[in-house]
Image (cartoon, helix red, strand yellow):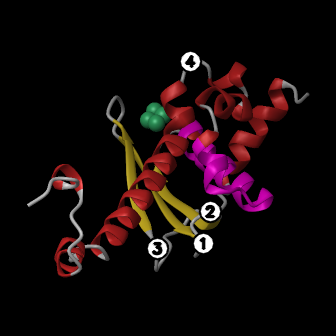
Amino acid sequence: MMDRQEQIEILLDHYENPRHRHALDPHDVQMPGGNPGCGDVITIYLNVSEEGTTIADVSFEGEGCTISQAGASILLELIHDEGWTVEDVVNLDYNVMMDILGTDIVKTRPKCATLALGTLKAAIKKYHRDRMKEEAGLLDDLEEVNEQYGIVTGDEAGKQS
Ligand code: FES
């Protein structure tokens, strides 16, 4: 178990030497996330692997308080070093994120501590939405094609003409 002082030093080190802090181009998703209480914003850049399950690359840019910026750097370092999947991020609980940073130190600043995670989750959601739209686009002319084959779907199915 790390003591409080060690945990503070890790936070300060990540704040002063942020990991993965740069834009990512090209990217699948660019997602800004803010804390309206203070005006701090971080932007997450995300690339997902071809098959949609692993995080190929993730980075951030931002200005803000120590905890929000160090939190982003620590989270992204974990994801890179441990090769997290998209599902790992989706399933990461906000309380666990606070634990990673040291609940003791960040408990009065939950918005700062979870800003990066919440923004990354939003980026993943957008990735899924974009992909679904794209896949739906491939089916744009489905009704037309089905009609040619005499296939009827939905409420009209099973009715005899
Ligand atoms: Fe703005 Fe922490 S004070 S995110």
Question: Which residue carries the number 4 mark?
Answer: 108
Q: What residue is disc 2 on? A: 53
Between tags 4 and 1, which lies in front? 1
The answer to whether marks 3 and 2 mark residues whose Cβ atoms lie closer than 8 Å is: no
Q: Amino acid at mark 3?
A: His
Q: CA distance from mark 4 to mark 2?
A: 34 Å
Q: Earlier in the sequence, mark 4 or mark 1?
A: 1
* Classed neighbour count for the residue bearing mark 3: other residues with Cα under 10 Å, few (<14), some (14–19), many (≥20): some
The part of the chain drawn in magenta is: 67-90
Report if residue 15 is visible in the image.
no
Hey, which residue is sitting farthest front in the picture?
160
Q: Label 1 sits on what residue type?
A: Ser
Answer with the quarter of the image where residue 147 lies.
bottom left
Of the numbered discs 4 and 3, the one sitting upstream in the chain is 3
Q: Say which mark, if any, is on residue 27.
A: 3
Q: Are marks 4 and 1 in contact (CB under 8 Å)?
A: no
Q: Residue at x 88, y 30 (%)?
A: 2
Residue 41 seen from this side: yes
Give the image quarter of residue 135.
Answer: bottom left
Please state the horizontal and vertical placement of residue 136, each as a whole percent of the image: 31, 67
Q: Is residue 123 left or right of residue 76?
A: left
Position of residue 7 measured from the top left corner of the image (x, y, whole percent): 79, 33
112 is higher (above) or lower (below) than 127: above
The residue tagged 1 is: 49
